[in-house]
Amino acid sequence: MAIHLLLDRSIVLWYYVCMTRCKTGIVHHWYKSAYPTMSRKQRKGVVIWPWLAAAFMFGILIGAWLANHQLLVELIDPTAHAMIISYTFPTPTTIKPKPVQCPTEVILRQQIINYILCKDWDGQGNTAVAVAHAESGFDPEQKNLNDGHSLDRGVFQINQKYHSEVSNLCAFDAKCNIDAANRIFKANGSSFNQWSAYNNGSYLQFLP
């Protein structure tokens, strides 16, 4: 497509230069004064081919310029065209959000939220925050005694009966509780189905 466009423009320029300049005889008059013994037919044969070549090259250059310099770029660097064609701008779905830096201390409410977000929840960090909010309101000392006399503990209300591997010392420490909840989440196929706030949908009101 680009080559055809350049050829069309070259032909137009060639026609303008050769059929106007040559026809009016400007160059012929110059040759006549420089070479008085040369006939007009001889001068015409000598002049026409340089003009044809010059007009064609001029047409190529103008055509390339009008085509946004694409041909000149390819002539200078043959790989440039391939680089332009192969490059695609990243879509918003491929741009990952900047990870939250884990706080060294996990005591205050915002520190607890940041520590939850810095853990790997398989793209469900906001859900993890919402579940913790619904379960305990981010209170590391939150306790809830169930009807079966089992105790839910800490930020993620980790049950004492079903997760006896999590000690009370760990469960009531915000950082250790979140780490344990993340392990439980991973062990259950990256699912929050171990938390009642997730199963009953009460966490939904805390999603951003």
Image: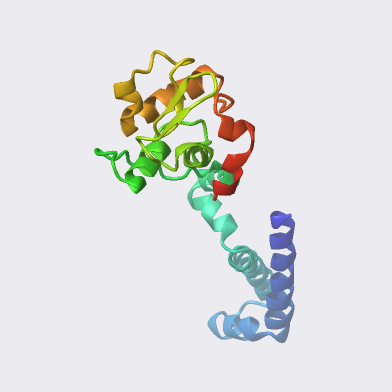
Residue at the image position 39 percent from the left and 13 percent from the top: 165
Query: Residue 13: which quarter of the image?
Result: bottom right
Residue at the image position 48 percent from the left and 51 percent from the top: 76
93, above or below 197, in the image: below
Residue at the image position 35 percent from the left and 35 percent from the top: 141
35, above or below 192, in the image: below
In this rendering, would 42 be left or right of 111? right
Locate the N terminus and report the quarter of the image it occupies. bottom right
Q: Is residue 69 visible?
A: yes
The image shows a total of numbered marks equal to 0
190, above or below 38, in the image: above
Query: Residue 167: which quarter of the image?
Result: top left
The extreme top residue here reads 165
The location of residue 37, given as percent across then percent down, is: 61, 79
The location of residue 55, given as percent across then percent down, is: 64, 69
In this rendering, would 87 be left or right of 174? right
The figure's colour scheme reads rainbow
Of residues 73 and 85, the one drawn nearer to the viewer in this rendering: 85
The location of residue 33, given as percent across then percent down, is: 56, 86
Residue at the image position 54 percent from the left and 82 percent from the top: 34
The location of residue 187, given as percent across then percent down, is: 50, 17
Of residues 34 and 57, the one drawn nearer to the viewer in this rendering: 57
Q: Is residue 84 visible?
A: no
